[in-house]
Amino acid sequence: MTEQCRASPRKRTLLQGSIVFNDRFSLIKCVVRDLSETGARIAFEHPIDIPPEFHLEIARKGISRRCRVSWSKGKEHGLMFLGAPGKPAYAGPLPGEAPAGGAEHDARGERIKVIIDGARLRIAREMGVPLHSVGLRLEVDPRQGGSDDG
């Protein structure tokens, strides 16, 4: 048996996934054939060109990870996850997205994005609909203070 030369062991899967890009306006369905802590192998019915970076969503596993394409061969593409395993996958904006200002602002924005994406996933599961079909809008009223005085 050949030993894998990978940062983390991969597992064969047959999961429905979606690549999401263009500020969440574009989505392409795929099949996730292999999955590990550090990447995935996805496949399509026909050869297809995909963007160099995007988010891979696997609703059944509750996964939404930012990815970079490592290799492409016809119908299959190898992906490297961006961001450390076990950490939120949103390590920064995708190409074309505006970066937030300041490290503290970035960290807070990333935490909020993870919370919202988690809520989207729970709503999709509860309603039995695809993750990409759930959109949430956050409104913050600046007149409301941060105290719990009532």
Image: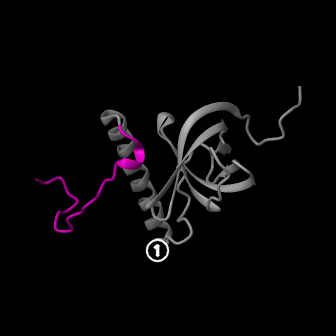
Within the image, what quadrant is residue 126 found in? Answer: top left
> How many numbered discs?
1
| Extent of the magenta region | 129-150
Give the side of residue 51 with respect to residue 137, left or right.
right
Q: Which residue appears at 61% of the width and 39% of the height?
A: 32
Give the side of residue 87 with respect to residue 100, left or right.
right
Q: Which residue is mark 1?
A: 101
In magenta segment, residue 43: no
Q: Which residue appears at 34% of the width and 34% of the height?
A: 128
Residue 116, image x and y in percent?
37, 50
Q: Which residue appears at 19% of the width and 63% of the height?
A: 145
Residue 88, image x and y in percent?
52, 49
Q: Residue furthest right?
A: 1
Quarter of the picture containing the N terminus is top right
Give the side of residue 82 with respect to residue 94, left or right.
right
Sort mark 1 into few (<14), some (14-19) or many (20+) by Cα contacts within 10 Å. few
